[in-house]
Image (cartoon, rainbow, N blue to C red):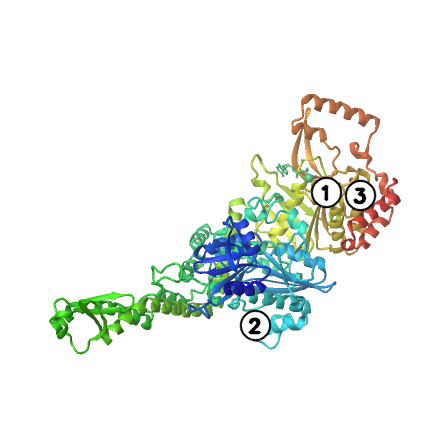
């Protein structure tokens, strides 16, 4: 093996421990990367790739960044999914000619704390997942807020859904577990880290407890395994400890409305199909003015409640601010300048707070009295207001400890306010005193010795000295100690001069060191108060969300929903919260919704572009808004709490690429049939459209029958379809009712009224849509002729509403529905696409009449 330099050997040793990270290796004022890391970094960061000698006749690639600019570069790498291990020089002395070095921090997408690397308005979750083939464990944490939670789930499918809901920035899996597609950054831990014994030990040791009872996960082995592995990963990356994780919450999905990922996508909750956040439901609702509020609102939106009492508390709060525009304005105005107390407090706990961060904590606390004042007359807000704690001692401590004009970060003198630390003041005054003393020395000694030419000077080798020419040598007093002889002068020192010299030279370093220590103490005391600070932060967030929802309600004319523990659902003049704001829309037509005993399942027919999809989504969104504790876009609404909302959109209607297959549609539909309950709300939009007409119609028909007849099901259902034949179901099934979108014919022209009315639609008005789309008049006209001709020769049920009858295909599924029973039996998640296709072919042969 060729001889390597000691530095190279040190590098390789450290790199060996961080094979999956880009190693930022501190060399003087730079962080350097080497070998493949250098190539990656140079490519990703536009750095110049150079090389460095590492031994006799050997060079390796190198690329570096200045240490003071490192954070920005690290942020860019982390944003691209890389990990960065930061290797620092430890201490200031070389050992055997080499600086000791150590990795002090590993930056990963799910564990960064730097504001510059984070989106302030959303949480930054790190998640771990583990399963035993059947059940699964999932834990997540946000070290910027101290959130740490774990759950045990019944199936890998539930795990995938919960992961989709959380949208973590990083997912840690056992090293031998296949990565899930669609996932963000995936990191690895050895599988034994996920073993129950190890995981439990990690948790017990971190929390300093004997059992996990207090955290509610005792007995839930998969939840423990996920949580323990997660904590271990945090400790590995943070090095300095993860004090901000102060408790673990074990949660269950039972308390929340379930929204699978397809539904969340279809309802465009946090972004639209096209990735637009502003036109999503969250975009419309989010009038919060603090990052804490923004994060809380997002969390509430992804996790609607099932608890009437809890929701009514939220609604009471919103109503109070809805009713008082003055209080709302005052509150929002004050909140606007409140910094992110939650993340700031956690930086104090983790020891990463800057002087500016502490000052911002004080700024946040200073807003408390004004917020109390603004809410004083609103009893409904008393609980939130009472939770605001101005933490006076902490604010006072920061005020007295940190200088007004402190530098933003440590490393420069002037962080600590004079008068706070006697020791620091002592060093400051004595160094000032020493400078004055040295400055006054020359005149003083000239006078004492009578040597008019005596000089005080300084050089690097001897420090301060007194210089006397040979001519005056006999006047030199006894206490002078000779240090150096020059051609025509002697240089002396005195013990006192040396003392002052030490004071002066050490002062700056000492001041920096003391400030650092004092700051760390202050930071520690602030960190100790974190539970109180975080409680205040939570109350701030709650007020912000409440004020935002009240603001939206007031501006958009929303009404407070009445919540019930039953399966009723009644909406008067409901609107679609996003589309009603659409540009180019003259007027949004409100619609009523009412699910009665004889209209549990509603078939909605109507021409293309008449407003079916809009109506369906609007009902789902109103229910969802009610269950996060928001007012709703309607004149009035009574909502029976809904345990799950399912939305399924026929394949051809689903816009975004990659999922537009009939297969996906059927997989998702099978999910509903297996999981819906009587308390669910189903939104089925053009289901069955992704295949040829008769297949699609048959499947749609059979699905409605199944929903209707299965005793576990009978959920409130809105089924929009362009299969007019389906209106025949209402005659056969008692819980099914028909609705359609009203159309007015004015002479030759047809006008879509966007109003949902009882009864089935009679025509599809496809030609009218073509006209709206701008097809040439001649084409429209000719199409009209052809249609008339066709209708004359082959009249269909669709054009003659009085001749409602079952479509022929439906006869294939008389009282029972073999295909549906088979579909329900299928474990679709266990099938390969090929098996699924073969299954479809088999059905097609058996039921579809073709080969
Ligand atoms: P469909 O599903 O019946 O094809 P959509 O729900 O997609 O129709 O609606 C088509 C368009 O009609 C929407 O983009 C919107 O511009 C308009 N629209 C829908 N519902 C309404 C309404 N209630 N009031 C006003 N315009 C509406
Ligand atoms: Mg539609």
Alpha carbon distance from label 2 to label 1: 49 Å
Q: Position of residue 585 (x, y in %)?
A: 58, 35
The residue at 52%/52% (across/down) is: 76
Whether the residue carrying mark 2 lies under 8 Å from ligand 2 is answered with: no
Residue 729 circle label: 3
**Residue 578 falls left or right of residue 345:** right
Q: Quadrant of residue 566?
A: bottom right
Proximity of marks 2 and 1: CB atoms separated by less than 8 Å: no
Name the element at disc 3: helix
Q: Which residue is mark 1?
A: 651
Rendered-image quarter of ligand 2: top right
The residue at 65%/34% (across/down) is: 753
Name the element at disc 1: helix
The residue at 62%/74% (across/down) is: 201
Answer whether residue 236 is visible to the viewer in this image: yes
Frontmost of labels 2 and 3 is 2
State which quarter of the image contains the C terminus.
top right
**Residue 243 falls left or right of residue 515:** right
Q: Residues within 10 Å of mark 2 (few under 14, many from 20)?
A: some
Residue 665 circle label: none
Q: Residues within 10 Å of mark 1 (few under 14, many from 20)?
A: many
Q: Position of residue 594 (x, y in %)?
A: 68, 47
Q: Which residue is mark 2?
A: 206
Whether 546 is drawn above or below 247: the answer is above
């Amino acid at each position: 093996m060729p001889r390597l330099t000691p530095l190279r050997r040190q590098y390789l040793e450290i790199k060996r421990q961080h094979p999956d990270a880009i190693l930022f290796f501190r060399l003087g004022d730079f962080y350097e990367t080497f070998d493949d890391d250098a190539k990656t970094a140079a490519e990703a960061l536009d750095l110049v790739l150079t090389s460095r000698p590492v031994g006799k006749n050997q060079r390796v690639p190198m690329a570096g960044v200045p240490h003071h600019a490192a954070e920005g570069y690290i942020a860019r790498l982390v944003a691209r999914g890389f990990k960065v291990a930061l290797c620092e020089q430890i201490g200031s002395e070389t050992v055997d000619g080499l600086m000791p070095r150590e990795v002090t921090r590993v930056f990963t997408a799910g564990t960064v704390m730097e504001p510059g690397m984070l989106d302030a308005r959303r949480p930054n979750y790190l998640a771990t997942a583990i399963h035993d083939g059947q059940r699964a464990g999932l834990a997540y944490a946000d070290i910027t807020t101290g959130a740490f939670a774990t759950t045990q789930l019944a199936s890998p499918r539930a795990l995938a859904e919960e992961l989709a809901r959380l949208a973590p920035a990083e997912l840690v899996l056992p090293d031998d577990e296949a990565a899930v597609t669609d996932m963000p950054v995936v990191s690895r831990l050895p599988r034994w880290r996920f073993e129950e014994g190890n995981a439990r030990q990690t948790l017990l040791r971190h929390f300093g407890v004997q059992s996990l009872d207090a955290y509610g996960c005792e007995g839930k082995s998969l939840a423990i395994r996920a949580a323990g592995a997660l904590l271990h990963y945090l400790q590995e990356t943070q090095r300095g400890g993860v004090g901000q994780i102060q408790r673990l919450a074990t949660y269950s999905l039972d308390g929340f409305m379930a929204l699978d990922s397809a539904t969340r996508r279809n309802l465009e909750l946090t972004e639209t199909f096209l990735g637009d956040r502003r036109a999503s439901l969250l975009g419309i609702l989010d009038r919060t003015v603090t990052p804490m509020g923004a994060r809380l609102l997002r969390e509430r939106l992804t996790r609607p409640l099932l608890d009437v009492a809890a929701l009514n508390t939220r609604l009471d709060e919103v109503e109070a601010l809805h009713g008082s525009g003055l209080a709302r304005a005052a509150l929002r105005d004050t909140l606007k300048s409140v910094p992110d107390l939650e993340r700031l407090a956690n930086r104090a706990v983790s020891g990463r707070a800057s002087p500016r961060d502490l000052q911002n904590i004080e700024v946040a606390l200073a807003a408390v009295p004004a917020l109390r004042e603004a809410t004083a007359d609103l009893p409904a807000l008393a609980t939130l207001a009472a939770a605001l704690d101005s933490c006076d001692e902490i604010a006072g401590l920061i005020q007295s400890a940190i200088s007004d004009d402190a530098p933003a970060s440590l490393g420069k003198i002037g962080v600590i306010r004079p008068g706070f630390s006697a020791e620091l003041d002592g060093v400051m005054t004595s160094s000032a005193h020493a400078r004055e003393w040295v400055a006054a020395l020359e005149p003083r000694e000239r006078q004492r010795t009578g040597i008019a030419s005596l000089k005080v000077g300084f050089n690097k080798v001897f420090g301060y000295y007194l210089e006397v020419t040979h001519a005056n040598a006999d006047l030199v007093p006894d206490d002078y100690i000779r240090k150096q002889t020059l051609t025509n002068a002697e240089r002396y020192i005195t013990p006192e001069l040396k003392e002052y010299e030490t004071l002066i030279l050490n002062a700056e370093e000492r001041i920096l060191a003391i400030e650092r220590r004092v700051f760390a103490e202050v930071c520690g005391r602030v960190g100790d108060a974190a539970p109180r600070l975080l409680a205040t932060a939570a109350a701030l967030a709650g007020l912000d969300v409440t004020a935002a929802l009240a603001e939206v309600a007031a501006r958009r004319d929303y009404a407070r929903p009445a919540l019930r523990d039953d399966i009723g659902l009644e909406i008067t003049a409901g609107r679609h919260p996003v589309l009603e704001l659409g540009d180019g829309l003259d007027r949004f037509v409100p619609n009523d919704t009412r699910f009665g005993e004889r209209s549990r399942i509603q078939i909605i027919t109507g021409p293309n572009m008449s407003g079916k999809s809009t109506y369906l989504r609007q009902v789902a969104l109103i229910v969802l808004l009610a269950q996060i504790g928001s007012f709703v876009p309607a004149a009035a609404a009574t909502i029976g709490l809904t345990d799950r909302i399912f939305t399924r959109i026929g394949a051809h209607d689903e816009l975004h690429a990659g999922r537009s297959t009939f297969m996906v549609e059927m997989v998702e539909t099978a999910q509903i049939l297996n999981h819906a309950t009587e308390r669910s709300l189903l939104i089925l939009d053009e289901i069955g459209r992704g295949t040829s007409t008769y297949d699609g119609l048959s499947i749609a028909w059979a699905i409605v029958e199944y929903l209707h007849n299965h005793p576990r099901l009978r959920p409130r259902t809105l089924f929009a379809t362009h299969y007019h034949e389906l209106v025949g179901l209402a005659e056969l099934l008692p819980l099914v009712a028909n609705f359609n979108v009203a159309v007015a014919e004015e002479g030759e022209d047809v006008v879509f009224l966007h109003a949902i009315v009882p009864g089935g639609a009679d025509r599809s008005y496809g030609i009218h849509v073509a006209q709206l789309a701008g097809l040439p008049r001649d084409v429209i006209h000719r199409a009209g002729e052809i249609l008339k001709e066709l209708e004359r020769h082959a009249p269909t049920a669709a054009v003659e509403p009085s001749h409602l009858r079952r479509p022929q295909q439906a006869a294939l599924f008389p009282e029972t529905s073999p295909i549906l029973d088979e579909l329900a039996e299928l474990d679709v998640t266990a099938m390969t696409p090929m098996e699924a296709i073969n299954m479809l072919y088999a059905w097609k042969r058996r039921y579809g009449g073709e080969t």
